[in-house]
Amino acid sequence: ASPRAGSAAAGDPAAAQETAVSATSPRWSLAIHGGAGTIPRDLPPERGAAYRAGLARALALGAEALERGEPALAVVEQVVRALEDDPLFNAGKGAVFTAVGTHELDAAIMDGRDLSAGAVAAVSTVRHPITLARMVMTETPHVLLVGAGAEEFADQMEVERVENAWFDTPARREAWERSREPGEDRDTVGAVARDVHGHLAAATSTGGTSNKRWGRVGDVPILGAGTYADDRTAALSATGKGEEFIRHGVTRAISLRMEIAGESLAEAARALIHDVLQPDDGGVIGVDREGRIVFDFNSTGMYRGAADANGRFEVGIWDEMSAVDRP
Ligand code: ASP
């Protein structure tokens, strides 16, 4: 859904104006995450390599699109679709199990140009929840559709449908059967971008927390909690204990601190992640209007990647990120 006329809409010349960038600011920037949590340092090397390769593939897809001049909104959707299809991550194929052995998916997308946004929660047969979220934005006056209503909306749209069990993977089933602990797997995915036109967008998609009660909705589809984008400040996507991110309105709080207190993205993200949230709650990725990328997390690790027009192409899991070849 788009905002009412009268707000800073796309037709407003001020909103449409390209953001001025300094000579060193990259013309486009992209950051992605594949979840933050307790990632063991002794993660088997082949598993670490598989995560890095999955992140690098999604990053390359987005980098190419941004280089072609595609809008941030289309790029973050495309990147999240790729991560939804990657069975390693807890979004789309490979989503975690609920306590009753099913999958319920949440996703949101937001356009920094005019605060247009769309989200879906607890959908169970949509292969790419992020695309349905984008249709909520473009095809309805609403911003969030849930459960049966979202499924019926999907019936009316041309989106790919699958049986709920299609989201199963042996690894997730095994982890679920082994632990039955809530919140163990946190490999939610997200992407934030600044395009060559100076616009920002954010997208996040998840299977939620493992062994969650059916009907539980996390922070991802709640605008201002797990997902937020505003061209005047930053595009943000979070991952971690959704309930905490909802309680503290983390992404909106970061944006507001930038807007009202004049903090940088790095300062505002640090305040929320380290002063407001508790250790191991999770993390956030963001890109500001100048294309500066920020990653911050208070867990042991966060699967993540960054690329920009200055040639940066890096992925990381724990403290450090390292340059990798573009696939
Ligand atoms: N934030 C997500 C949720 O609570 C989980 C995650 O980040 O993996 O639904």
Image (cartoon, rainbow, N blue to C red):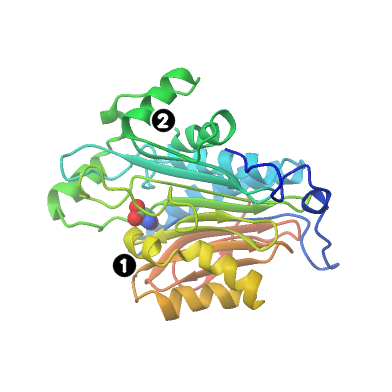
Name the secondary structure under disc 1: loop
Q: Position of residue 234 (x, y in %)?
A: 63, 61
**Residue 260 in the image: above or below residue 158:** below
**Residue 143 in the image: above or below residue 165:** below
Mark 2: C-beta under 8 Å from nearest atom of ligand 1: no
- Visible residue check, residue 268: yes
The quarter holding residue 98 reads: top left
Q: Earlier in the sequence, mark 2 or mark 1?
A: 1
Q: Residue furthest front?
A: 6
Q: Which mark is residue 196?
A: none
The quarter holding residue 94 reads: top left
Q: Nearer the viewer, residue 15 or 169?
A: 15
Residue at the spot of label 2? 127
Mark 1: C-beta under 8 Å from nearest atom of ligand 1: no
Q: Residue at x 45, y 63 (%)?
A: 249
Residue at the spot of label 1? 40
Q: Residue at x 65, y 51 (%)?
A: 112
Left or right? Give the position of 228 relative to 106.
right
In the rendered structure, which amino acid carries the disc numbered 1?
Pro
